[in-house]
Amino acid sequence: MDKQTVSRDGTPLAYRRTGQGPVVVLVGGAMSTGATAAPLAAALSDRCEAVVYDRRGRGGSGNTAPYAVEREVEDLAALIDAVGGEAALYGVSSGGALALRAAASGLPVRKVAVYEPPYVVHEGGAQERAEYTAALTEALAQGRRGDAVELFLRLTGLDPEVIASARQSPLWPGMESLAPTLAHDDAVMGDSRVPRDLLATITVPVLSLAGSASPAWLREAARAVAQAVPQGTYRVLEGQTHAVEPEVLAPVLAEFFTS
């Protein structure tokens, strides 16, 4: 990251701008930094100016306590102000939930696109998410960062054997360094259900995307978001999973943001 701005509470935020065209701020999900979105920013750069940033507690950004979701909305307000006073938002996974919250708060946002915000659409899922929240809170309070990361990976559906292998990977220490921010994403998701009343207040166009190869519940959640906002569109990207390919996603986003 080569630029910095400061949020309302004094937290420094690291960001980078790439390309030319309408400004789009890319909002990452759990266990990600601004660098994670760099390939998508590059793929968008011929039609949009993509802004990637480190959410608070990650990479080059600060982490002023106490945490609150409202502070992350203020972070986006500071970023939008720094890059021209108005922007579109794209959020992936829990970053999509944050982008939707920001749009509902009245920030100067032109359009919002989200990819598979992980809202639960059935009661069993809500109970599983509540159990995850309790276990995550306990693990982080006890300083068991590795266990916190494992809890998250289990929530995403990874096999125990894959997780055990990941623990031996040279990438694991970096994942543990991001473990405290799992609580941030958990807070962003609230009670994990689709926040229909909140979404109904969003006054700008929303494109809600999902992958055809993703679990059915993620597609259902994306569809529910499009149905809950006044100007919502739902679209499925063929062959894509939750780890959507930038080369497939970028043309869809560019068309939406430049139209």
Image: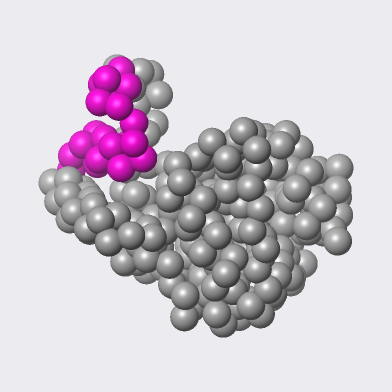
Relative depth, front residue between 204 and 16? 204
Q: Is residue 167 something that shows in the picture?
A: no
Against 115, is 204 above or below?
below
Measured from the top left, where is residue 67 in percent x and y? 35, 65
Q: Is residue 252 something that shows in the picture?
A: yes
In this picture, residue 117 sits left or right of residue 17:
left
Picture residue at 86% right of the left edge, 54% below the top: 21
Picture residue at 55% right of the left edge, 60% below the top: 223
Measured from the top left, where is residue 233 in percent x and y? 67, 63
Relative depth, front residue between 232 and 79? 232
Picture residue at 53% right of the left edge, 57% below the top: 222
Q: Which of the image's four quarters has the N terminus?
A: top right
Measured from the top left, where is residue 211 in percent x and y? 58, 42
Measured from the top left, where is residue 6 in percent x and y? 56, 64
> Magenta residues, as a range?
143-165
Characterize the magenta stretch by its predominant secondary structure.
helix
Picture residue at 86% right of the left edge, 48% below the top: 47
Relative depth, front residue between 190 and 84? 190
Q: Is residue 218 magenta?
A: no
In this picture, residue 66 sits left or right of residue 119:
left
Relative depth, front residue between 19 and 219? 219
